[in-house]
Image (cartoon, grey):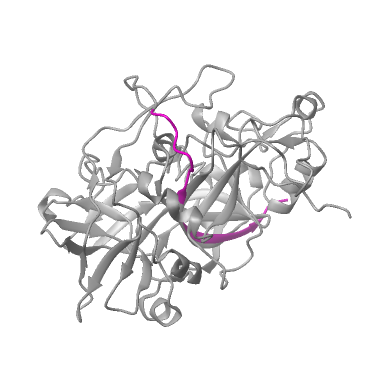
Amino acid sequence: MQKKGRVMKPIKKLGRCICGSMMIFVVSFSTPQGSLAANPAADKKITKQFLTSGQVDLVREVVTLPLHRGRLASGETVWFVLTDVSDYATSKKMGLTWAPSLAKAKDLTSTRVAEMDESGNFTFNSGRVDFSQPQRLVAGAAPNFFPAKTARAGSVGDAHYSPLIRVANRKDIVFNAPVIAFDVGPEKIAFCDGSPDYSVVTDSVASICPDKGTVDLKLRFGFANGKHLRYLSFDANSEESATLESSTFAPAESDILQSGATEVIYTIVNGNMGAKDPNRQGLDSALNGEGPSLDILAHFTEISAGYSPMWDVRLAEWTKVAISKDQRKLITDGDDLEAKSASGLLVSPAGGAGEDDGESGELSGRRLHQRIISWPHTTALPPFVRGAQSVFQPLTLTSIPKPPQWLVISRVIFDCNWRAK
């Protein structure tokens, strides 16, 4: 029987990466694919937006979401956003993305328990996030900038934190409710005109205005089904992934893989380099400060009954033969990536030259173990350029902790409908 394609498969020593993300919209572009980073808003058109509670600014590449104020049962203030929900009626009522697969995560240890009163105010039983430490990121030595030499996330969740919550007094509906700030008053996070203090808010915030009840979050760039994709990245179960995605390190969310409530996203490791190269892509390029890694969400065409904002990140590496024959190209479609894997052009970084495992037709190898989003996932990766501002600054070296067994990325999608040519 002919095999459609091989999927990168993890080995035990490195494991998988999950990112918590949210799909936002599909955008149509009138300019060539390679000019992604600097297109004016006039060249872009949103053709489908999934998170309707958000207002998108294509000039600034941000989305404005309602900022919610809740509290822990122990009294601390929790500032958060809502992006996805497992219940269809609630998604329509609140303008959230319907993600029914999240219902599979309701009994996981990492899914926090909450209650919601008649006014829509949330009280959480657990889950703290520390935003005080500075983000640190140092690329590896050229030409292999990935993995990073140093990675320290700017925000860290405790042993009980993940973005998912189960509302016990609302029929156990599961929300994706990432924390934006924790245990601070509104005066401490009032940055309505931008330039936020990242020691009190998550690093993906562009501006935040508690008095107006809004927060502007920086969009991430990627592809799905040959089209441009915009999404948000909130957390990862790997510290390097969280650092790369400017998201929260949330090791507790690793157990999401037990539920099967995940999507697959591919990240190229060693694509073409050069900020102006129309085929530029990958973690090496991103860590070199050339732009986002431009990940590929696999087999996505529409929000459906199986959708989840938790993304299982899988790495793919061009072979030496592919590089020597100048066969590296920008990949924008999951089927195309898997076809290139089946033909031996792409392999998992820790795998051999594309050996079949004899059972599923998958490549032996590994998934991303140090990275963003949820790295993560989900993450990212993630654009290493925030709008026009690079995330790279002089950083202090720090040791990278031992990677978790599973890597998870949480991402929120907006769908962008510019078909890559």
- Quadrant of residue 77 in the image? bottom left
> Does residue 156 lie above or below 224 as drawn?
above
Q: Which of 226 and 350 is in front in this view?
A: 350
Q: Position of residue 292 (x, y in %)?
A: 52, 39
Residue at left 29%, top 46%?
159
Residue at left 79%, top 23%?
324
The stretch drawn in magenta includes residue 185 = no
The stretch drawn in magenta includes residue 403 = yes
* Total number of numbered discs in the rendering: 0
Q: Where is residue 288 in the image (x, y as percent from the top left)?
A: 51, 26
Q: Which of 333 and 34 is in front in this view?
A: 333
- As drawn, is 177 to the left or to the right of 374? left
Q: Which of 329 and 28 is in front in this view?
A: 329
The magenta stretch spans which residues? 401-421
| Residue 219 in sight here | no
Q: Position of residue 332 (x, y in %)?
A: 67, 49
Q: Residue furthest right?
A: 1
- As drawn, is 370 to the left or to the right of 250? right
Q: Position of residue 401 (x, y in %)?
A: 38, 28
Quadrant of the image containing the N terminus: bottom right
> Does residue 339 lie above or below 170 as drawn?
above
- Quadrant of residue 12 in the image? top right
Q: Residue furthest top?
A: 141
- Quadrant of residue 321 in the image? top right
> Does residue 388 lie above or below 142 as drawn?
below
| Residue 218 in sight here | yes
> Does residue 94 lie above or below 393 as drawn?
below
